[in-house]
Amino acid sequence: MLRKLPVCAALTLLSTLVFVSSGAATEKSEQPVYHSLRETPTVQVVRKARDSIVSLHVKKAGLSRDIIGTGVIIDERGYLVTNRHVVNGAERITVRLADGQETLGDVYHQVASYDLAVVRIKVARQLKPLPLGPAADVQVGEDVIAIGHPYGFTHTVSRGIVSYVGREIEMPDGNKLTNLIQTDAAINPGNSGGALLNMNGELIGINVALHDKARGIGFALNADVVQRVLSRDLSALKLYGLNHGLTCRETIAPEGAQRQQVVVQEVAARTPAATAGLKQGDCLLRVGTCAVHNRFDVERALWETRGGVKIPITIIRKGLELTIEMTLERPSLASNR
């Protein structure tokens, strides 16, 4: 049975309901959105790159303490790039992966004039590589992130800007390094060989040095230079005698998930690439099981491949995605690696 309330009681009840309702709405709307505020581009970049960054502990004759450096995984089979001055003359290289696993490494290749070295490790699983580049469009003033192991403090992240592009410095061994990226991101002993990333999470440089007479000045090898040197020195032809016949170049795509594209610049006559039907202007997406981000990826995709084997190559031609097969020539000389 309904009972009629006095006017004052009804008004009191109505105001109470309005207060409770508006209070609940206010409380709900003012809840802090922790996740969206903390999930910054920097956090996303670090998370993306972390598993590809390793620490190096290098024992050298005559030194009581290990040299500490950083490396970046560039191939899932266990190849990583670092600075030559970190591993040159090493008696023992201990590589520690992001998950804490330790293994021994061997120097696979060195380039003194660029202070570059490639170290190989053997593990029972595929690793996560971080592709090189693009770095052709690096801008002075843009934000960058350095990841490394300064003074042994593993996976240290620092942030700064690009201070200059195209710097030249002379190293203690007398070699001059050119086309360097200068940054004010903190780079200290132990950062050598580590990653310099832009805010897209792209590897634009390999940290190489800090200036001994100034604070807040560090340098990184331009990633375009690194991949060009590696694709030349560690080509399938040099390592295994496998001649594919392709000359490639990188271009910056105006849009798309992958900003840097690898385009066929030239196809040598009477080579496996020509026989397979590859043409100038083809955009390479994948060679074998390897995704192609730069011309170095084309070479490393063919490492450890036997002559006479058919390699599937995925391309884009005139807007259409195609997969063709290229049969590599048998090696004319055996690999000495």
Image (cartoon, rainbow, N blue to C red):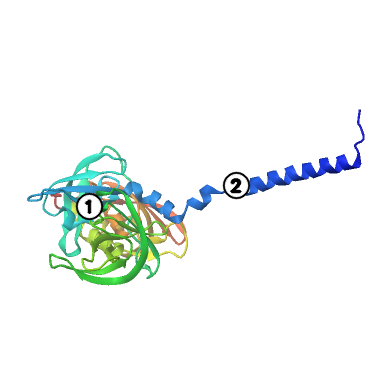
The residue carrying pointer 1 sits among few (fewer than 14), some (14 to 19) or many (20 or more) residues within 10 Å by Cα, namely: many
Q: Residue 14 vs residue 36: left or right?
A: right
Measure the alpha-carbon separation of dots 1 and 2: 44 Å
Q: Percent position (x, y) of residue 109? A: 17, 54
Residue 337 to residue 256: above or below = above
In the rendered image, the residue lying farthest to the left is 62
How many badges with numbers are in the image?
2
Quadrant of the rendered image containing residue 275: bottom left
**Residue shown at 80% from the left, 45% from the top:** 15
Please state the horizontal and vertical placement of residue 36, each as a whole percent of the image: 52, 51
In the figure, is residue 38 to the left or right of 140? right
Residue tagged by mark 1?
A: 69
Q: Which of 311 and 17 is in front in this view?
A: 17
Do the residues under discs 1 and 2 have CB atoms within 8 angstroms?
no
Type of the residue with mark 1: Gly
Name the residue type under label 2.
Answer: Gln
Q: Say which quadrant the N terminus sits in.
A: top right
The answer, for residue 108, to whether it is visible in the render is yes
The residue depicted at 32 percent of the width and 71 percent of the height is 164
Numbered badge on residue 256: none
- First-in-chain label (1 vs 2): 2
* Residue 289 visible from this viewpoint: no
Q: Nearer the viewer, mark 1 or mark 2?
A: 2
Q: Residue 31 carries which label?
A: 2
Picture quadrant where residue 180 is located = bottom left
